[in-house]
Every structure is written in C-alpha cells, then in structure tokens.
Image: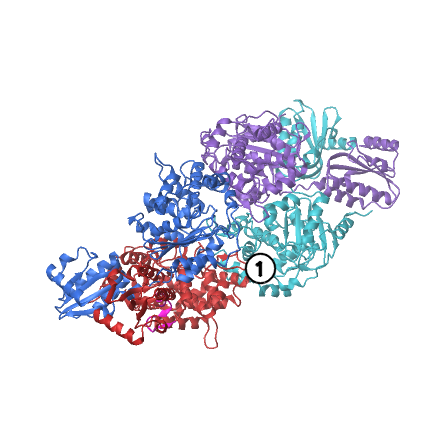
Chain colours: A purple, B cyan, C red, D blue
Amino acid sequence: MNTPVPEYLADLLRNCKAFEGGQLATYIPELASADPNKLAVALTTLDGIIYTAGDDEYEFSIQSISKAFAYAFVIEELGSTVVKEKVGVEPSGEAFNEISLDQTEERAKPKNPMINSGAITVHSLIPKTTRADRAETIRQFFSKLAGRDLSFDLSIYESEKDTAFRNLSIGYSLRNLDVLESDPVEIVESYIKQCSINVTVKDLANMTSVLVNDGVLPTTGERILSRQTVRQVLTVMTTCGMYNAAGNWLANVGIPAKSGVSGGIIGVLPGQVGLAVFAPKLDQYGNSVRGIDIMQQMSNDMGLHLLEGIPSSRAIINDQDIKEVEADVKVYKLHGVLQFSEAERLLRKLQEEKRGSNSIVFDLSHISLVNNVGRRMLLDGIDRLRADGHRVALIDPEQILPNAKTNLDFEPKIYHEIQEISKEKA
Amino acid sequence: MNTPVPEYLADLLRNCKAFEGGQLATYIPELASADPNKLAVALTTLDGIIYTAGDDEYEFSIQSISKAFAYAFVIEELGSTVVKEKVGVEPSGEAFNEISLDQTEERAKPKNPMINSGAITVHSLIPKTTRADRAETIRQFFSKLAGRDLSFDLSIYESEKDTAFRNLSIGYSLRNLDVLESDPVEIVESYIKQCSINVTVKDLANMTSVLVNDGVLPTTGERILSRQTVRQVLTVMTTCGMYNAAGNWLANVGIPAKSGVSGGIIGVLPGQVGLAVFAPKLDQYGNSVRGIDIMQQMSNDMGLHLLEGIPSSRAIINDQDIKEVEADVKVYKLHGVLQFSEAERLLRKLQEEKRGSNSIVFDLSHISLVNNVGRRMLLDGIDRLRADGHRVALIDPEQILPNAKTNLDFEPKIYHEIQEISKEKA
Amino acid sequence: MNTPVPEYLADLLRNCKAFEGGQLATYIPELASADPNKLAVALTTLDGIIYTAGDDEYEFSIQSISKAFAYAFVIEELGSTVVKEKVGVEPSGEAFNEISLDQTEERAKPKNPMINSGAITVHSLIPKTTRADRAETIRQFFSKLAGRDLSFDLSIYESEKDTAFRNLSIGYSLRNLDVLESDPVEIVESYIKQCSINVTVKDLANMTSVLVNDGVLPTTGERILSRQTVRQVLTVMTTCGMYNAAGNWLANVGIPAKSGVSGGIIGVLPGQVGLAVFAPKLDQYGNSVRGIDIMQQMSNDMGLHLLEGIPSSRAIINDQDIKEVEADVKVYKLHGVLQFSEAERLLRKLQEEKRGSNSIVFDLSHISLVNNVGRRMLLDGIDRLRADGHRVALIDPEQILPNAKTNLDFEPKIYHEIQEISKEKA
Amino acid sequence: MNTPVPEYLADLLRNCKAFEGGQLATYIPELASADPNKLAVALTTLDGIIYTAGDDEYEFSIQSISKAFAYAFVIEELGSTVVKEKVGVEPSGEAFNEISLDQTEERAKPKNPMINSGAITVHSLIPKTTRADRAETIRQFFSKLAGRDLSFDLSIYESEKDTAFRNLSIGYSLRNLDVLESDPVEIVESYIKQCSINVTVKDLANMTSVLVNDGVLPTTGERILSRQTVRQVLTVMTTCGMYNAAGNWLANVGIPAKSGVSGGIIGVLPGQVGLAVFAPKLDQYGNSVRGIDIMQQMSNDMGLHLLEGIPSSRAIINDQDIKEVEADVKVYKLHGVLQFSEAERLLRKLQEEKRGSNSIVFDLSHISLVNNVGRRMLLDGIDRLRADGHRVALIDPEQILPNAKTNLDFEPKIYHEIQEISKEKA
C-alpha cells in the first residue's frame, strides 16, 4: 500500500479556498514578475521524511524566512547571551519594516530578529572569514540544512538592492546607535543577498526538520543546533513570526511560523512536523494568502496545535503492562516517552508496591524518548524500591540508564535470565 | 515506597534563590500588610493529582490570575466570536494597567484580556442573572474549578475599591467608546470583587487542571470548557500572561502563565502539568519575585517547556511490535498516542506490506489517546490494505475505532479467535 | 459720519464662504439641538469699544473658551510657578480630549491647559471658599470680565454631566497620578459647570479686551491680570488654542485663539484687537466651520497677524521733528511708542549732536506709550548729552519720566519758558 | 554722544550667568575641538544697523540655523503651496533628529522644516543649476543676506559627512516614502555642506535683518522675501525653532528663534530687532547654554516679547493734533503707523465731525508706515466725510495715498495753499 499523505497534500492544494485573493509583492520589482499561479506544499516528519505536492521543484527567493535560520546560526556561533545583547525576543506589535527599537533597556536594540532591523543586525553578527563573506557563509549553512547546494538569485538581489531604501534607512539608524558596528551599506546589501537565496518548498521542509527534531538534522543524525537554540528560534517564531497578528495566528493556527515576501511560509510543530508552503500572492501584511489558508487547513485537518497538549503520560504504564513473570518477579513494561509527567505517573504507580523483598524488573525496551528528568526520577524510584527491600533489575537494550547497572541488585547473569524469561513470557 | 515529588517541591521552596528580593504591593493598602514570608507551591498532574509544599492552606486574593478563568468563562458562555469583538488576543507590549486599545480595527477594543482594560471588559460580559450578580456568578465558577466553595475577601475588596482610580479611569474610557455598555463604576467594582476571591495554591492548581486536561476537570470527568476555549485561554497566557516580557518568559520558562499582584502565579503546560506558586513580594513589573524564580526552576528541573516538542511518534510502532502470530496472520501492536505524526509513521511502516491476501491485525489496546486525524488515517490505511487484498482485523477493547468492525474482513468469530491467539502468543 | 466697522462686520457675515459646511456637535445631546443658523461676530478695540454684527445677543455655553480665562484666573491667584508644576505649556500635537500627559518631567502633568486634562486640572486649582464653590467663583470672574452677570445654562450642564465619560476617565487618571488631589467626580462636574456658562459674542469680546490691553480691563481701567499672566495665556493660545493645527493656524491666521465646541472662537492680537465669533456647526476637529472662515477673513482683511511686525520705531523721530526754536535751543518732538527699538533709533540720532553747551529739549507730549527700557535708555541718552556739555530739558505733561526733572539742567522757570517757546513755535 | 547699546551688549556678555555650564557637541568630531570660551552677540535694528560685542569676527559653522534661511529660499523659489506639500508646519514635540513624519495626511511628510527630516527635504527642493549645485546655490543666497561672501568649512563638512549615520537613515527613509525624489546620499551630503557654511554673529544678524524688516534687506532696500514667506518662516521658528520646549521658550523669551549645534542662536522680533549669539557649550537639547541665557536676558532687559503687543493705535491722533488753522479749515495731523487699529481709532474720532461743508485736511507727513487696510479705511473715511458735505484735502509728501488726489475736493492750487498754511501754523 501507499501512504495517503501525498494525496492529502494534493487535495489540499486543489481545494485551497483562497484561490483568487492577494497581490504580488511590488516593492521589489523582480518579485512583481513572479508567476502568480505557482503553488506548492511540503511536509517533513520528525524523522526527516519529506512529502510534497504542487510545484515542489519551483525555486523562489527565501526572503524573510531566512531570518529564522540566520538567527539560529548566530546563536549557535556566538551564544545566546551575546546575541540577546544585540537583538531582543519581544513581540514588536509593528509592521515588519519598522525599526522598532527597544529603548527601555540600557542600550537600544531591535525588539526581535523577525523584523528587518533585527534581521539586519543578526546578519551583521555572522562571522566574516577569509574564504567567505557573510552571505556566502549563510548560504553554506542553509545548503547544509536543505541537503543540497543552494544558490543566490542574482537578479532578485540586484533588483532589491536598487530599491532597498527602507532597509538602508534602518541600517544607518542601527549604525548610528552602534548596534551595527561597520558600514551599514555593506551589511544591508549582504543581508539582501541572504534573502535572495533560492529554495523550493522541499528545501524549506528539509530546513525545518532540524527545528522539528530538537536541533538534530534527521537525514544525517548530526546535531546542528543545541536544544536551547531551537527553543529560542521557536520562541520568536511563536510570538513574532507572522508580524502583527501573533495572537490570532497562535489561537487559530497554533504553529510557530515565519513568512517571506516572495510567498513562502514555514511552520514548525516541535517533535511533530515541519511545513512549507509557497504561493506568491500576498495579503496586506505581506503574508501569502493561499499559504495562510493552507497552513490553517493543515492545522485543522491534522490536529496540529502547539497548545493542544499531547497527554503522553497516559502511555507510560497501564495495569496490563505489569506482569508477574514468576513468583516474586514482577516486570514493568514501560512505553513511549519518559519525561516528568510520565515518570511522576510511574512512581505514583510504584507506591502500590508494598515493602518486601521481591524482584522488580523495568523493561525499558519500548521507551522511545527519555530526558534527564525522566532518567533521574526513575533512578530515584529504583533507589526507593531498594530502600523498601526490593531487588530491582533493568531490561535496557538501548542503554537508557547507562550507569544504572552497577548499582542494581541482580547479577548480570540473573539479569540476563530474567530478560530471557521476560521475552519468553511475552 | 513514596513518590519523591513532595520532597522535590519542599526542596524547591527551601532553596529558592530569590529569598530576599522584591517589595510588597503598595497600590492596594490591604495588600501592603500581607505577610511577606509566606511561600507555597502546588502542582497538578494531567489526571488531577495535586502535590503541594509550603503554606499550601494560606489564602490570598486571586487578583489578576482571575483574568484567565473569567476569560474562559465568557468564551464558553458567549462564544469566541462575540468575545473577540469586544477584546483582542494580541500582545500589547504595555504595562498591565495601560488602557492599550487596538485602534487599527474598525472599533476600538482592549488588545487582550490579560491587561486591565480587557479584563474589565471581559467581566462586563458575564451575564447577570436574577439570582447572582457578575461577581457571584464568577465566584461560583471558580469554586467549581477549585472543588470547594471560595469566598470573597471583603477587606481587600473595600481597600481596593477606595483607590481604584486607575481602573475607574479605564472603565470610563471604555464606557466612552461603548466597549462597556453600562455604568462603569458598577462594572469596575464588581471586577474588583472578582479579584478579591480568596484562594490557596491548592485551589489554583485545581483550577489549572481543567486547562491541562483539555477542558475536562480531571477530578470529576466533567467537560467544563471546549477544546477551542482552552486553546484561546492558553494563547493569551502564552503571549500576554507575564506582561512586558512575553518573549523572554517563553524563551526561558516556556510555560503559559498568569501572575497576580497579591503574589500568585499559575502556569499550564497542556497535557502535562499545572503549577501554582505564591510569595507576596513583587518585582518592578508586579510579578512575584520568588514565584518567578520557582517557576523558572521547575521548568528547568522538570524539563517543562512548551517549545520542547515531545516526539511521541517514535512510540507508535517498532519492529519488535510486529509479530507473525501464525502463518499469514501478522499482529501490529500499537502504543501510546495516535495523532497525525504517529499515524503517518504507522502508515509509512505499512507501505512495506506487499500486495497479498494475508491477515493483518491491529492491536489498539495500548493506545492511550487518539484524535480524529489519527482515527481517520488508520481507517484509511485499513482501506488501502484491503484494496491490496489483505484481510484486516482489530483488537480494540477501548472502542477506539467504534464503527470500524462492520467494515472489516474477519467474521466476529474469527476476530475473536485472532484476539485469543494474539493474547496467548503475547 | 459713521465708522464703517459695523458695516464691514455685517458684510463679513453675509459673505461667509463656509455657509453650508460642518455638523452640530453631537457628543453633548443638548448641543445637538442648537440652532445651526445662528451667526455672530464681535470686535473689541484696545480701548474697549465693542463692534458687533449678527446674532450678537444670542447666548451659548462658553465651553472650552473658558479654559483660557480659567487659566488666567488661577495663575493670577496662585502664581505661575505653582500652576506650571501642575500643568505644562507645551503643544500636545493631540486631539483636545486626549489625556496627553508629559511624562518626561519628574512628575506627570497635563501638557497644557487647553486640552481637557489640563483644563480639568486648572479648574481643580480654583480656590474653594465658604461662600462659593469653584464653578461659582469662576462665574463671578467671567462676569467681571464680561461686564455683566453671566449665568449657568443648567440644561447644558445636566446634559453634559450625564455623558461625561471621557472627562471622568481623564479625571480618574489625573487622580491616580495625584495631579488631582480630591474627588475627580466633583471636580469634573464643576468643570463641566464652568463650561456651561452662557455668553454672547459681545461678552466674549469684552472678556478678550483684558488680554488685548495687557491685563487692564479697558472699560474700567482696573488691572485684572499681570503682564506675565497675559503673556502666558497668550502663549498657550498661540501654540495650543486650535488643537492639532497650531502651525497652520499661526501661519495662515496668525491670531492667538481658542475655540469651543458650542461654536464660539475668540482671538486676541495683543495691543490691537480682540475678536469673537459664533456659529454652531463644527469641522472634524471640533472648531466652528464658519467661525474659522470668518477669523481667517478678518486676519486677511484687517492685516492682523502676530508675526507681521509693526515697525513702530520709524515714528519716534524724523528730521522734521527736530527744530531749533531759538539759538542754541533745539527741540526733539518724539512721537508714538518709546520702547527699545524706538529708543535705540532716537539715541542713534542723538549721536549726531556734537559736544557743546547748547540746550536740548525733548518734547514727550506725543509719546503714546513708554516702557521701562524706553525710559531707561532715554535717561541714559540725557546723561550722555550732559556729559558732553549739553543742557537738557523736558516737556513732559504726562510725567513719562517722573523723576527726571530734578536731574535736569534747566531751572524750573527756564524749563517752563522753553515749554512756552516750544508751544508758540509749534 | 555715543549710543549705549554696544556697552549694554558688552555688559551682557560679561555678566552671563551660565558661564560654566554645558558641553561641547560631540557627535561631530570636528565640533568637539571648538574653543569653548568663545562668546559673541550681535543685534540688528529694523533699518539694518548692527551692534556687536565679544568674538564678533569669530567664524563658526551655521549648522541648523541654516534651516530657517533655506526654508525661506525654497518658499520664495517654489511657492508656499509646493513646499507645504513636502514639509508641514506643525510642532513635532520631538527631538531634532527624529524623523517625525506626519502620517495623518494623505502622504507622509516631515512635520516641519526645523527638524532634520524636514530640513533635508527642504534642501532637496533647492533647484540645481548647470552652474551651481544645491549647496553652492544656498551659499550664494546666504552670502547675499550676510552682505559678504561666505565660505564652506570643509573640515567640518568632511567630519560630519563621515558620521552622518542618523541623517543618512533619515534620508533613506524619506527616499523610501518618495519625499526625496533622488539619491538620498547626495542630498544628505549636500545638506551637510549647507550646515558647514561659516558665519560670524555679525553675519547672522545681517541675515536676520531681512526677517525683521518684512522681507526687505535693509542695507540695500532690496525685497528678498515676500511678506508671506517671512510669516511662514517666523511661524516655524515660533513653534519649532527651539525643539522640545516651544511653549516654555515662547512664554519666557517670546522671540521666534533657531539654534544650531555649533552654538549659535538667532532670534527675530518682526518689526523690531534681530539677534544673534554664539557660545559653543550646549545643554542636553543641543542648544547653546550661554546663548539661551543671553537671549533670555535680552528679552527681559529690552522688553522684547512677541506677545507683548505694541498699542500703536494710541499714537495715531490725539486732541492736540487736531487744529483749526483757519475758519472752516481743520487739520488732522496723523502720527506713526496706519493699520487697522489706528484707522479704526481715527475714524471713530471723525464720527465727531458733524455734517457740514467745512474743509478737512489730513496731514500724512508723520505717518511712518501704512498698510492696505489703513489706506482703504482712510479713503473710506474721506468718502464718508464728503458724503456728509465736507471738502477734504491731503498733505501727503510721501504719496501714502497715491491715487487719492484726483478724487479730492480741493483744487491742486488750494491744496497747496492749505499745505502752506498748515506749515506756517505748525
């Protein structure tokens, strides 16, 4: 059989309600000549599988979507503290092309990296090397995320550079405040070059997958961004990604997102999916009309919403997962995620174990994810059981509790036997 | 054994770093005489278990924390559309006591329900009945959420009423704009009465549990709020709950929250936990100094962060969960949550099934949660397998796919047998 | 013959171009029922002669025009320093009903007394006495200026009081900031009563005459306001009197002015004329449409413009005014104003007097106005002439240089003779 | 004798109270190296006499003082309507280096020509010719006003050009809004060159004399600016010349003024005097500390205040100026200014003339200034006297009523005789 996801995506494009609305961007002459009928969507799973529909090979300039990834790059390079000294993380309540400096702090700085002043400042933080200028460095980074060599669209770049009055005004204003520390014309032009990098929706989906997967590029397994960096990027996408309507977007669509003036939008639901859409006609705020429509539809259809919690603790342990495999040997077979909520539920269940000397085995082979809290709490539970007189062993093929074995009461041999028994009984 | 959570909470209070900072609220005379050393924390699980530490029976006035629950109440009563016409959902970037009207829309309205102008307007939307005025109606609602009969703190109420110049100014301004439709003095005084309802951290934790659990009060199983209402309340808590520093709070703490001037803060991580802290000394923004410190600590210690996705799809199916129980009968044992991400992963796995006439059984007895998308996609997968020639059956004791049986290829008898076989083999 | 001024004013009303435009004020119900066709104009000269045309006996509520005179009253009562601590003198660039507080100073205060927040604060500064509340005190003051007993329009007062939401909002906001120091409802209602005082254009013209005439009421000769008070009132009329369009008004009309929502406008050109117009239909800024048209027309027709300087120094002395009445006795016959410019010109002329012992007589009988600077400089010139050897005498029937005689070189007798000679020769 | 004005000015500098305060401008490196002890003052009379004291030959760059004269130039070149479409006349309430666009109008434009955005826009309106760029054109204009060939200070120009980030930001912002219509870098650099023109206080006093004297350069008698242009320049100096404190300046000093960051301030009291001061140390608003102190002192000492009206009407006619020179021939000897106020007073006096056939002679030889209104009203009075039966003649050596003679009732011969008689009797 075949998975229905591609068909779903194709239907989505076919049924897009907003088919007629919007206008092509006019402020960059070259964008005004785009083909208004292009339409594409792509979706990446947690493990990096890409589904697409429509004009998924059509290239367009990344524009403001680049802001999110360039921000990730500089936080990773310079650290969050250095970057926060230059650019804030607060919603600005203002249009994307406002300067919107936060004057309440000791030193003026752009309110967030999703407005142009913030994005230009972020670009200025990209280290220059002898071999690559800033735009080239960021192109290489984007290429790595996309999994292919991306290129600049030089006609877009030239076109935008000639009419970049607003950005040059912002650049000089930032230079005046020493937020930019060198020639603003060079920085702004390099920033415009960053915006001119050509991508397809497939590229964008690949790029989002690193944010979906907590900083690890699922196609290669390489950790590109720290967990902290991902958090911070997703924070500004949540509160500032869709400009003036952060609250409405979060209430209705519920997916941290970023749009670009060429007609692209990306969305990231961490741990779940990454989305990318493209359709060039824009609404009054500069967001793709059909893109918004499709994102909204996907959020509804697929039940994707940041604020609809996944009650993952319900999976960790159920009565049927607790089996007495032989006299005095009970196996707890754990499932799914093991974080605070799940660990709390497990330990609560363990309270039913009375003081005594029987053996308890935790089968961790079905645990899909554990974090430090889950690990610590499980170890604490084991300690408490032992303090009550129990003997505890683990079935832990994935080494979820790597250092736990030496502390345990079963000999390796016995441990192995228990495991075998457990397997047989299963 | 005993769960370590109470000890953890007690340690948290003991080690609170911010022990010395902050000032008592002074703008309401009665608050200025609060005991500055009171300190309490409470935590509710998804299923409504409450853990507490410190002065967990100490009562204090709910103040602005009431804004979140009153907002939930009026959305539930009047519908989201009616409420949105009166109060927006956008961050205001302004202090809590600003009027902050959104003038860009056709009619002026407060930017969100977390600032005073929005909260006063929300209060005015509470229907008056012959038996209860607005404050009494909301007291009854809060009591239901808290699971006990809450009362007004009349000395706080009187104290605040006498110095409510700012709120009266806001009230008259809203009346002038026809946002309020009757005497603003009556509404403001009734709103102040809402703020004077006395609660403990235990009450607050109980109240948050309905938001943690998607609108259902876990202690009674009663649905109090629709999923849509919960989403909207959590949205405004995410973007406007902690006043001027929404972005920093989301980046660092990552828990939708609401604070009150008496020193309380609540936090909600949907599907995971609800939190409540209390400590009367405030920072310059009017947030509890120790409360923030403790919330931050809990977020770090427990790995609670809205933007740290739970990769729940990894649990749904693994190779070891697929077993050929007899010739031509294969059982897929599914685990955990079944939403879009998991269904996509399952269906992708099913693509490995070649065309043929063997039997496939889905064991749904370990599914902890399913939503419409998950249900629809699983049914779609079943249809596709059948179109490929397979025979499909379900083990579905929880009726996760209630209407699926009639469409299946196994006779009930055979279905039952398979289930037995499956059980025996397990 | 008769002066043509009344005919000019009548023509002005007849030819008013704006006859059709504007709307009646609607925010006060009672004003909405005014007769839209009423039209009146009045003009006062420096010496208090009143010319009128149109409905000059029609009474209307003074409304915001009262702000200028109440401001004058409190400065006179409390001193400029005290009042400036409470209300600024800067243009607000905002509509009249904005709060517009100046937050840059140490303590918040309304930006100027011409916006409602400033006017309410000014009203609160009127001292209360055992015999009269604030509104009554100000009614008595206005009556004194108008030269007749003015009365409150109680139906306007009641009507406005019932819908004074905006002003009550402002009042509570000012109370919150301790700008108002007692119950804002009482102050706002009393302020509204001040606004309800009934006047005719003739009354308004009489009231402006004290501002035209440097603080002295020309009809009685009584000094009501100090020169400093008049300056300050005219300053705020110049920069804030016509709300948002101070610059345009100053450029085009050039007359310090104040308008009211009932349709009146006053204008004051210090030292020249005072103007008052009335026509109830308003433009979008709340200014009388015909009133503005007529003020503009009068400014053009009569060449009245604050920034068109009067080159009064040209009159002080001309060659034909210097006559050698006998050998060695020269008479300088001075004319007009004697201030700095004139004195400088006179003293420059005196430089032509060579050292010597001849007699010089200054005939001051045609001097219409002298100020301290003019007096001091003339005395200085006399000293210098004497230092050069001249003998100097004065013809000074008006005692323009009261203490000068004792210092002069002519014996009283001789002085008298010179005067006689001078008279005969004239 | 000698006039005491130079001594007064020298005393003023000696006694300047603010001797120690302020800081040198630092934002332009070259300005930071100015000699902080330089101090100079100059004063021009209505007829162009210049008095000076202190370092009156010391040259400094004109900086923002140039804004007033460049504004005058473009209004004169392009007309007020064209210029107002590009730059408003409203106070901005903001610091001089804010962009401060008026967005309420149909098209964005700088609020006034005294803030940098307005001044840069004004500069862009200077027509470029084949022989002179904008900076050169304005240098020639300033030289004409100053009465000597002024030069650019190229080291100041270069220094400022290198750090003109703020102005370049403003320039690009204006270009973005199409307020500037060509390359903003060229315009901003040319504007900076305008600001670098070197002047002395004597030059500035000469330049102001054209504004004092209603548009006519008193030293040459040439009309440089129309009356309308002068009005408009003085309007923006009144409301925006001293930045944030327009109201306080107008209340306390009362002289339309403009300051520059190099330490100069000019002041203009139309019809009276022009002032220029120079002292390089600045207050926090960028105004010369000693300059302000001296201007304030001069306003007090010399009684110069825009809002202290000159009651010039009192001079026009007094009883002693009316003489019956022979039976049935009465002479009215008029003095000083003849504008509306004076004409009204004269005509009021003429109302005392009863119907009859006697002859009335107006002696206009002491009239120092007449405007159209005064002329028209006097002619109207003459008509009315004739309608009453009187015969009217004029003594009008200055041709104040040039076309009046042909309408008069005396034969030229008789007229001449009357004049003779009048002279003899005088």
Q: Is residue D128 magenta?
A: no
Label 1 packing within 10 angstroms: few (<14), some (14-19), many (20+): many
Please give the residue where the numbered disc 1 appears in the rendered image.
Answer: B191
A195 or D191, nearer to the observer: D191
Left/right placement of residue C115 relative to residue B39 reads: left
Q: Could you tell me if residue D330 is visible in this image?
A: yes
B56 relative to C402 in the view: left or right: right
Q: Amino acid at mark 1?
A: Tyr
Q: Dividing the picture into quarters, in which one does residue B152 lie? A: bottom right
Q: Position of residue C269 (x, y in %)?
A: 34, 61
Q: Is residue A195 left or right of residue B204?
A: left
Above or below D101: residue C220: below
Span of residues in magenta: C210-223
Residue A399, image x, y percentages: 78, 33
**Residue B170 vs residue D91, the one in the foreground:** D91
Residue B151 location, quadrant? bottom right
Residue D120 in the image: above or below residue D386: above
**Residue A286 appears anywhere in the view:** no
Quick check: B126 above or below A226? below
Residue C394 in percent (x, y) is at 31, 70
